[in-house]
Amino acid sequence: MNPPSSTVRTERPRGRKRALLTASALIGVSFVCTAAVLTGSAPVVTHLDGRTNYIALQTTAAEIGADFAAWPSEAENASFTLDLDGDRLLERGVAHTFRMAVRNASPRLAAELTMAITPPAADTPEGQNALRLFEELRFTVREGDAVVMDQASGADAAALLRRLPEPVSSGGVRTFEIDITLPVDAPEDVAGLRTAVQVEFTGTSTNPTARSAFE
């Protein structure tokens, strides 16, 4: 039998070389495409740098018939404390009413708001007396014609927490009237006590995917 011709022996290595070159070319294309995808996503990562994607709330309050004070700085907490003492003495069955406004100072994000009326800390004897009075109070909150809280008891923490309807756009303002009443049947031993009433707001972005990774 004649040995294989030189032509046949040289064609097989070439076939293997062509196959390897083809695979190498495909891998090269794959790497190039992957690099292109990562490069294309870079602007999105840069956009979510936290400089404009944050929620900032500001509050101000005033007695009925008085003008609101200027908005505080963004660094201040979104809360207001009413100290029921001095010229704010409560008469049984007579509501003390004040107004409160909250503004969404976020540069671009709308926010869903939660309002909370929080009790005083009872970690001192004065605080315990303040809490006794606070738990006897009744709170009614109105936003225009809508009733947000209706005679909520100071002893019912769940009733003093409300998620407000409708988000607030960037720069938007919500205004409330808040009645604080000491019921006519409140126990006699709360006479002469004083308490602070704090109303605070927290905000949540309506677009969670837009939140910064730095929040």
Image (cartoon, rainbow, N blue to C red):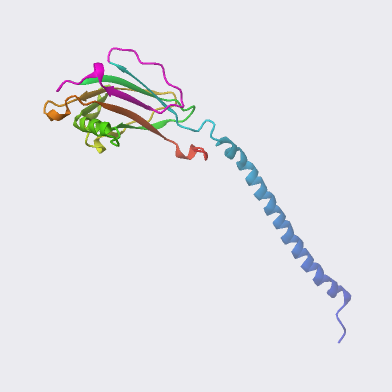
The quarter of the displayed image where residue 1 is located: bottom right
Instruction: Please state which of residues 191 and 62 is positioned toward the viewer in this rendering.
Output: 191
Chief SS of the magenta region: loop
The residue positioned 12% from the left and 25% from the top of the image is 184
The residue positioned 34% from the left and 13% from the top of the image is 67
Task: Pinpoint residue 73: horizontal percent, then vertical percent.
Answer: 46, 22
- Please state if 212 lies on the left or on the right of 95 as rendered: right
Q: Any magenta on residue 66?
A: yes
The residue positioned 23% from the left and 23% from the top of the image is 179
Q: Residue at the far left: name it.
A: 185
- Does 3 appear above or below 85? below
* Magenta residue span: 64-93
The residue positioned 23% from the left and 26% from the top of the image is 140
Task: Pinpoint residue 55: horizontal percent, then vertical percent.
Answer: 45, 31
- Does 41 appear above or below 142? below
Q: Residue at the far front: name it.
A: 125
Instruction: Please state which of residues 98 and 17 is positioned toward the viewer in this rendering.
Output: 98
Instruction: Please state which of residues 127 and 41 is positioned toward the viewer in this rendering.
Output: 127
Task: Pinpoint residue 28: horizontal percent, then vertical percent.
Answer: 72, 54
- Does 1 appear above or below 113? below
One can see residue 116 in this view: yes
